[in-house]
Image (spheres, coloured by chain):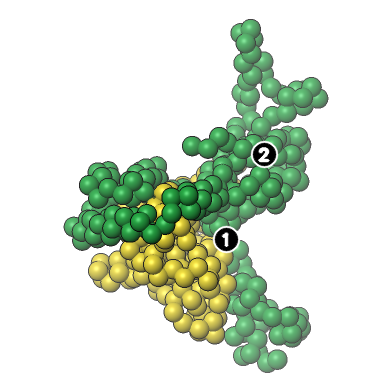
Amino acid sequence: MNCQQARDSLGALVSGDIESPPRDDLEAHLRSCSACRAEFEELESVWQELGRLPAYRVPDELKESLESLSSRAGAGSPNSFPAKARLPRRAMLLQAVAALLLLASGIAIGYRLQPAAEAEKSAGSAAGQMSRYLLLLRATETSELSDSRQEQLVLEYASWYRSLVARGLGLEGERLQKERQLIVRENGGVSLLGPQAFSDGDVAVSGFFLVQAESLAKALEIASTCPHLRVGAIEVRALYPE
Amino acid sequence: MESVRDGDLKCLTPLCRRHAAALYNYFMHLTGNRDTSQDLVQDTLLRLLRYRAGYKGNGPFRVWLFRLARSAANTHFRKSNRELPLDLEELDEPLEDPSEGPVEALHRRQSAGRVRQALGSLSVGHREVLVLRRFQELDYREIAQVCGTTPAAVRVRFHRALKALAKAYRELTERTVT
């Protein structure tokens, strides 16, 4: 493999989209050619930097608009288009009205053609596909980690969470502050949760992720890939359906 | 999605919940603008409703969805006559580390800012191929289906896009240092 051929394949090597035989040749070339290796390292570095960008959080306003739009579309009323929906342009408004009119006719036709029991079954199968699960990150060793290791972990959490978001599975993720971990009990007692509590079962929660998955098994599968497992345990809890 | 296509619109809510974040992130990386991205997510949803009969169910739904999203983005860029938006708003950082020192935090923010600025300086074609591969984790074949081209063309475009990103990032870093 010459330098030109090698350089044309560097992008595919960086993104992992190269088959095994050419990859072996390319890697052999990179070991022997410092100029191509330097170019590869620069591309690899910026690719990693790009991957470290945090995911954007969906604004509540958009969530509300989508919930409203989809629930009203589900009800099939063309007059119930959400007033708060962000549709600033006249063209978009016209599109929305047209789409809802189409929807209304689609529902009518759909229900006429589909037996009720079958309609219910298909609704159940798709609507029930996703449930929400809370992943509680139980810290057991975090206090002993160095600052740089913690920083590295946070980057890994961010990358892991972003991949969940990209797959449509990640809903929320937050880290909790270490200080002022208080427990309130029924008798009015308030206790400070510190490292000494780890031995008596009150393990501190250092953060959480809210994810959606088709089943508890899938949620466990998601949790099993979380970088937190290297420093603690994860409690997986199913939420009641909305 | 099959249920929505067949007229069962109750399934639209879980469908929206599942894909809203992916769509919003896609548009934010393309436009850098929060309001535009929200509009485009809704536009994509309306396209999904309008063209749902065209979903054959024989390929990944995400590919079909991102074809609609790309079409919505293209319409936006054509109408606004703005191919290179650099409307870089404040990042939401859901996993900000409270124990992070001010120097580290500044360094990380500067680095992230440069990457976003470098990404924003690319053409839309270059930006979209990087975003679809990096953040949506579509492979070359799937990106080709989204963009209506061949995997070989995506491979070339991706390589050029990554080189352009590295060059822009290097220049921004050098400018910061000097």
Q: Given this view, does label 2 or label 1 mark the residue nearer the observer?
A: 2
Q: Nearer the viewer, residue A208 or A67?
A: A67
Q: Nearer the viewer, residue B34 or A63?
A: A63
Residue furthest out toward the left? A90
Element on which disc 1 rests: helix
The answer for which chain carries disc 2 is: A
Say if B171 sits above or below A27 in the image: above
Q: Is residue B59 visible?
A: yes
Query: Which chain does green denote in the image?
Result: A
Q: CA distance from mark 2 to mark 1?
A: 27 Å
What residue is drawn where x is 24% and y is 60%? A98
Query: Which chain does yellow denote in the image?
Result: B
**Residues at circles 2 and 1 in contact by the CB criterion of under 8 Å:** no
Q: Earlier in the sequence, mark 2 or mark 1?
A: 1
Residue A51's label in the rendered image is: 1
Q: How packed is label 2: few (under 14 Cα within 10 Å), some, or many (20 or more)?
A: some
Residue furthest out toward the bottom? A2
Pointer 2 residue = A236
